[in-house]
Image (cartoon, rainbow, N blue to C red):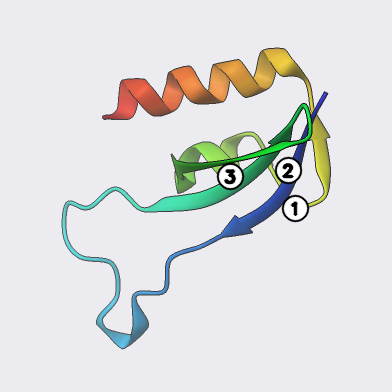
Amino acid sequence: MVFIKKIDEPDFGCEGVPDNEVVCDTVTFVVDSNEIVVKIPEKIVWHYKLDENMEISNKLYLELLDLKRSQN
């Protein structure tokens, strides 16, 4: 299992999200006692209903990494 320790959402202030920019959250995972920080598009975080202090399967973790790579 993989633990989601923290999810930081970007703060664009009163200017809002810049046009044509993919909004990414910074997600801190704990995998085998190691913290791994990954930027994941916010729409993917919402789609999978990811939240802090949540455990996810290794399979889902690897899927998220693959989805992140395909977004770049």
Q: Residue at x 57, y 42 (%)?
A: 45
**Of the image marks 2 and 3, the number of the one nearer the N terminus:** 2
**Of the image marks 1 and 3, the number of the one nearer the N terminus:** 3
The furthest residue to the bottom: 14
In the image, which is nearer the foreground, mark 1 or mark 3?
1
Q: Residue at x 69, y 42 (%)?
A: 50
Name the secondary structure under disc 1: loop
Q: Position of residue 12 (x, y in %)?
A: 34, 75
Name the residue tied to disc 1. Answer: 52
Disc 1 crowd, CA 10 A, few/some/many (<14, 14-19, 20+): some
- Which amino acid type is marked by label 2? Ile
Name the residue tied to disc 2. Answer: 4
Name the residue tied to disc 3. Answer: 46
Marks 1 & 2, CB-CB < 8 Å contact? yes
What distance separates the C-alpha of mark 1 from that of mark 3? 12 Å
The numbered mark at residue 5 is none
In the image, which is nearer the foreground, mark 2 or mark 3?
2
Given residues 33 and 49, the one toward you in this image is: 33
What distance separates the C-alpha of mark 1 from that of mark 2? 5 Å
Work out whether 54 lies above or below 11. above
